[in-house]
Image: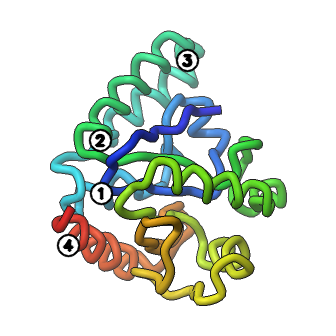
Amino acid sequence: MLPEILMQNLRVVFVGTTISETSDELGFYYLGPNNRFWFLLEYAGITPTSVVSPSERKVLFDAKKDRVLNEMYKKLFFEKKETELLKHRIGLTDLNRRRVISNDDDPAAEPTMDDIQKFVRKVEKYRPKLVAFVTSMEIFENCFKRLYPSVNRQRGKQDFLIGHSEVWLLGSTGGRVKDTEGLEQVFEDLATRLGGF
């Protein structure tokens, strides 16, 4: 399982549902073949360049296919990308830190109430300015409705805080998402908000 990227004083922590097999095997977050997360960060100006470029992703896929992607290389790649993200005060984690899953449709991907409570304690401890959920609207609502009744499925800023942290719902960046314009817009809105931090 990939380590979390967390520390004090982050501008934003992006929160996925759980780690995919592809990302776990390749050694970093959001590396599914059609996942748009890294493109969207660059597109919106949240990072000046793509943290994981398409060519780097291809190198990782080819190395895995050729059975030459070893743990040492994955560790070095992770550390390099972690350093780059932390330089921009960006963190990464997932709600379900127990399981690696094939895709979000896997029933094992659904976070439990224990997962959610652990996540809330983590946010209260690290106190990022903002937590941004890169997960489906349905999973987001199912996870947080009991704790925060004002949760809704609208992309953008939510009407509740976790600890002192502002909460945003971005939606899934996986390849099956069809509303690419909506995703691009909410990432742009988030970039504008992050400009104040």
Residue 33 percent coordinates (x, y): 50, 48
Viewer-closest of 57 and 114: 114
Who comes first in sequence, dot 4 or dot 2? 2
Please report contact status of discs 1 and 2: CB closer than 8 Å, yes or no.
yes
Q: Helix, strand, or loop for circle 2?
A: loop
Please report contact status of discs 4 and 2: CB closer than 8 Å, yes or no.
no
Q: Which residue lies under the disc numbered 3?
A: 66
Q: Residues within 10 Å of mark 3 (few under 14, many from 20)?
A: few
Q: Helix, strand, or loop for circle 1?
A: helix
Label 3 to label 4: alpha-carbon separation: 42 Å
Q: Residue at x 46, y 72 (%)?
A: 167
The nearer-to-camera label among 4 and 2 is: 4
Relative to 190, does residue 18 appear above or below in the rendering?
Answer: above
Q: What amino acid is at disc 1? A: Leu
Who comes first in sequence, dot 3 or dot 2? 2
Viewer-closest of 49 and 128: 128
Who comes first in sequence, dot 3 or dot 1? 1
- Could you tell whether 79 is left or right of 23 in the image? left
Q: What amino acid is at disc 3? A: Asp
Label 3 to label 1: alpha-carbon separation: 30 Å
Q: Helix, strand, or loop for circle 4?
A: helix
Which mark identifies residue 192?
A: 4
Q: Which residue lies under the disc numbered 2?
A: 51
Who comes first in sequence, dot 3 or dot 4? 3
Q: Which residue lies under the disc numbered 1?
A: 41
